[in-house]
Amino acid sequence: MATTRVLVIDDEAPIRLLCRVNLEAEKMEVLEAADGPSGLEKARSETPDVILLDVMMPGLDGWRVAEELLDDARTRSIPIVFLTARAELRDRARGIDLGGVDYVTKPFNPVELAPLVRDVLARVEQGEREELRREKLAELRAMLERE
Amino acid sequence: MSIGNQSVLLNAVPLLVSAGVYAAVSAALLPAVWRDRARAHPLELAVVTVFPAFSVAAAIFAGLVLYDRRPFGGHVWTSFAAVTIATVPAILFLIRWNDRADLVGGARRAREAEARVSLRDRELEAVAALSNALARASDAAGAARPLVRQVRELLGVEFSAVVAVDDAGAEAAGILGDLEGLDVDWWPELRLDLRNEPSGIASAVFDAAPVSVYDVQSSPLVSPRLAQRLDAKSGVWVPMIAEERVIGVLVAATTREKHAFSQEEIALLQALAGEGALALDRMHSAEALSDALAREQLVAEIARKVRGELDVNEVVRVAREEVQRALRADAVHVVVDPEERFATDAATLRIERAQTLTEGERFLVETVGREVGVALQTARLLAENQRRLEQQGALLHAAQVVTSALDIETVLQRLVEEVTKLLRADAADCYLLDRERGVLRCAAVHGLDTSLVGFEFTPDKGVAGLALRDERPVSAEDYDQIEDRVPHGAYEGFSRAVVAPMVWAGETRGVLGVGIRDKLRSFDDADVEALEAFASLASLALRNAESFEDRTRQARVQRAFYRIAALLGEPLSLAETFDATAQAAVEALGGDFGAVVTPERATTAVVGAHELPDEVRALGVPPALADAARDGQIVASPNAAADDRLDEAWRRGPFASLLAIPVESVPPGIVLVFFRDEHVFTDDDLELARQLARAARGALERSRLYEAERTARSLSQQLARTGSLLATELDPAAVLEEVVEQATALLAADAGALASLEGDELVVAAAVGAGAETATGARSPSTGWLGGDVVQSRAPVAYEDASADPALAEWDAVLAAGRYRAYLGVPLAGREGALHGVLAVYANEPRTWREEEIEALSALAANASVALSNAELYQRVAVEREQSVAILANIADGIVAVDREGDVVVWNAAAEQITGVPSAEAFGRTPAQVLQRELESESGGTNRLVSIMRGSEEVWLSLSEAVMRDPAGAIAGRIFAFRDISAERAVEQMKSDFVSTVSHELRTPLTSIYGFAETLLRTDIQFGEEERRTFLGYIASESERLTRIVDALLNVARLDTGDLQVSLEPTDVGAVLADAVSTVEAAEPNGHRFELRVEDALRAQADPDKLRQVLDQLMENAVKFSPGGGVVRIEARRRPDGVEISVADEGVGIPPSQRERIFSKFSRGGDGTQATGTGLGLFIAQGLVSAMGGRIRVDSEEGRGSRFTFELPAARSD
């Protein structure tokens, strides 16, 4: 089985490093991009298996990057997991709504990143991408209702 | 034999023989040589002298031999042979003895032959050259010139000339004479009479052969005048013959010496003359042709001019002038044969000229003569035609006059005018024959005193008498000599007159005459014919006029009946029918004016009239006429003035006769026909009158029916109109006025009033007509009469004449105020069956209120009550509406209402203010059109959040919507109420942004700290020392970052609560700035340059930590908002009351709209792309500066950068 390739798009260098160290520890290959435009470029040229995408970035923010990725035939199929510091539920919902398959709320335990990536990839490979998104949305809705 | 003997025998003897032979030859040649010695050539002489010379030489040698007895030259035989050989030529000569002469003449003859050949060649050349020259010549002189030159050159003569001979051979004319190369100027003028004057030319012509004269001066053959003039010596004349006719003569003559012309020379001249003749003949033909052409053109030109003239005199003048010019004649006469006026050969031209006319010119004259004849004929025919046309035109005109006008006087007047004009007479008159009285009466004159009209004389006088007696036109040549003239002074001075009887269908009607005063003029047959024609026309006109009068009368009667018949078929009103009946009667009976009266109604006697004078209209109908009418009797009064059936006023009326025809209509009427002049009534007239009466009755009855129907229709139409008028009136007071006006107009009444029921009183609320003002507001008890009756009976009340009971006026203010007599009142219903009041109309005169009129007024009252209710209702609604509008205008919320179609009908002041759209712009459009945004929603609901654009500004509305439904449940409109919550929303948004930002700002370092800590805790991975350090370094720096953020938040909290503590102390500004800049420079990766400029020893009263915090914030911003790098300038300078510090960048700048907000909490700058940070930095900076007793401000230009400046108090001197 080929190595899983993960593209991390985040403007914060420590967070990119955090992801790299922990994903590489799980035998995954990690690609990095420090802003939206270079992240798009990398996604198109390298076609990673999964993308970890920060939302709040100067310049092109995560929402816009996700939109462009999903708009582009070359990158449309790559599952996107949002890394968001935006605690509000509606922000998380927005990411899934846009087409993301999952989200990770900052701060997060980096040790859990690799299992999450693996899980997401497994679901997507089984053709359950949309189902996954629906689950996440339902989850969020439930949380919203609880609030 | 001895040598001696041998010498003698063989040398001397042969020498002697030889000498003898040569001597014999010499002797034989001598005579011929002698004869030709003059012409002999020297060489010939040399040859001839050879023979004697040789003879002598031989004899000498023989003597020597004989003497010496020695052989000649020492050799016997050699010498013998030499001598023998030398003798041979002489012997040969002697053998050809007969040809001896040739020896001398041969050379000469050869020369002569050569000379002859040469001459022939030159002749040939000359002829050829001449042919060429002649071929090029274009006229006779041109042809003659090379000829004479050749002659002179070839023959060596001094003079040569050519003459032309005419066709008849009678005259010769000089063409060209050449005397020693110069033209003889008189030669072309030369004319020779060949028949009567002897001359060389004549001889050559008549002999048709060359004539040569050696001595000209003495020869009788030669013309002495020519010979002398030329001083000729010898001459030769050679005829020039072409086509067997002598056409000219070639002359050659010497003037210096006499010369005998040889045969060769003459032959040469003949050859030349032959060539010349051909050329001359050609010229002659060409000239003849050219002459003929020119003549033809001339003739054509003259003919064109002559034909172009249409006047006889002009034709003659033009012909004369043109021919005179063409022929250079002294005079030209055109003679016209008067007997042959219309023949084309009537004209002859006679030419006066010294020279006789050539054949061509004669031809021209004849042709022109013929042309003149044709032109004269044309001109005359045209003139004749013109005159006939004029006559016919005049007759036609006269005929038109006769047929177009039917008034006999007009016709006759026009006829005399026309006939005067046509016959160019001075005067014309027309007399009509009155057989009964036996006189001719003047009916029309022209050119005579008009007082003549009416003059009479017995028809046996004057030319008229003759014309009447003979029954044909009579022309009097000597008018003033006539014995029995018409006895009137107007006819003095006339010299000629023509009179024609006016006869039509065998009956003489009068006479028509014309006259002229000028004795030189007279009338011709055509004039008489024209007059006769006019006279016929005049009698025709008379006849027409008479028959027209008859027909007019018939037509008048017919017209009258047609009129009445037409009335029966036409829906005319009664008044119109009465008028038409009067007109028909007047026309049928030939009266002057007429009337239709109804004697029953004393006040309005005349109901119809035609041309009726007002004075007659005012007269009352005499009782006798009324009685007669009732009995159906026609009253005819031929002499009204003396008719005692008529009263005094009628007897003095402006009429002489009258006819009164009763019409048995309902009510009965009388048709009156008046005659200004006395009129005798025939039985026909009376019968006609009866017919008329019957016809009129039908028309009147029909019209009455129609009138009733029309009134009903008119009432209903008017009611309908009134209803619609009232329906549109919404002011109750105005409705009352309108109702009263309409009611009055509807029944053609004189006044109207509406009294409202108030309690038990009737109050006049509105009134029109006389006394209306007085009556308005008047009150009367509802229990009284008139109006009271109406109230009580709730039914119409009508009085034909209310004045009959004086008490009634007390109950009705209008009746009293206007002194009205007729009254009609109807109840006016109010709302819900209540009685509103009474509607009444009044008339000045007693009046029978017809049923349909009462119904109409009741209907109007019903309409009026509906209109009143409407108006009152409307009034109430209007008031309510006013209230609503006032409320809407003063409410703070924007209120917008739309109708069923979604168009805006309410747009209050607050809506204007919130949306920025004036109501005028919004009305009639949908909110979506006005605001570019739909306001309504499917669910409706309250407090929806909707954004609209107010100009470029986004405005957030809290919108509530209510749906209005009509009674049927359909949506009848919507009402939107909204508040502008943009400000609240902005604060909310900022708060929300702050929460996410702070969340982000806090969570990001936390992520690192937590993440690296967890990572380090992993036991499954062995990290190297360096990695561990990096992780721990991140944990440390991110912890610091977290601390800073927390500090900032704490600062904000303190600023909000006013708890911020500063410890002010004298602070070295330069040091703080330098430290801050060096720190930021070290951390700056984006290539910004920092320029620090600080005045020396700047000390401010400040908290160094807080100052540093402010500087850090400003520099961080400067870097953040100049993403392209550039210079960041930090400057500090002294100010009068402190220290001023500024931080300037070259970045994106701050748009004006944001400048006010940048120092407020949660405000984040940039366009979003730089939007990181809490939005608290400048808020804190401002708070810190304020806490230190300073102020901060910003200057910025969008796209060029920003400059933040703050001031701090100067350090207190310590």
Image (cartoon, coloured by chain):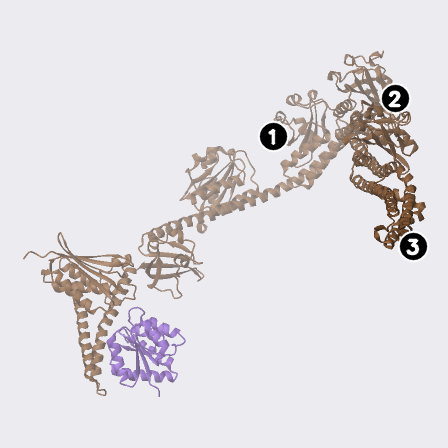
Q: Which chain is purple?
A: A
Circle nearer the N terminus (3, 2): 3
Q: Which mark is residue B1?
A: 3
Q: Is residue B683 visible?
A: no
Q: Are marks 2 and 1 on the same chain?
A: yes
Marks 3,2: beta carbons within 8 A: no
Around disc 1, counting alpha carbons within 10 Å, would you say few (fewer than 14), some (14 to 19), or many (20 or more)?
Answer: few
Q: Are marks 3 and 1 on the same chain?
A: yes
Q: Quadrant of the C terminus of chain A?
A: bottom left
The residue to which callout 1 is attached is: B602
Q: Quick check: B1095 above or below B633?
A: below
Q: Is residue B54 visible?
A: yes
The amino acid at mark 1 is: Ala
Residue B525: image location, x then y, percent: 85, 23
Circle nearer the N terminus (2, 1): 2
The residue to which callout 2 is attached is: B471
Q: Of B689 and B270, which appears nearest the observer?
A: B270
To which quarter of the image does residue B708 belong?
A: top right
Q: Quadrant of the N terminus of chain A?
A: bottom left
The amino acid at mark 3 is: Met
Q: Nearer the viewer, mark 3 or mark 1?
A: 3
Q: Report helix, strand or loop for mark 1.
A: loop
Would residue B1145 be found to the left or right of residue B361 on screen? left
Around disc 2, counting alpha carbons within 10 Å, would you say few (fewer than 14), some (14 to 19), or many (20 or more)?
Answer: some
At x 29%, y 86%, the residue is: A27
Q: Nearer the viewer, mark 2 or mark 1?
A: 2
The amino acid at mark 2 is: Glu
Residue B53: image location, x then y, percent: 86, 43
Q: Nearer the viewer, mark 3 or mark 2?
A: 3
Q: Report helix, strand or loop for mark 3.
A: loop
As drawn, the residue found furthest toward the left would be B1214
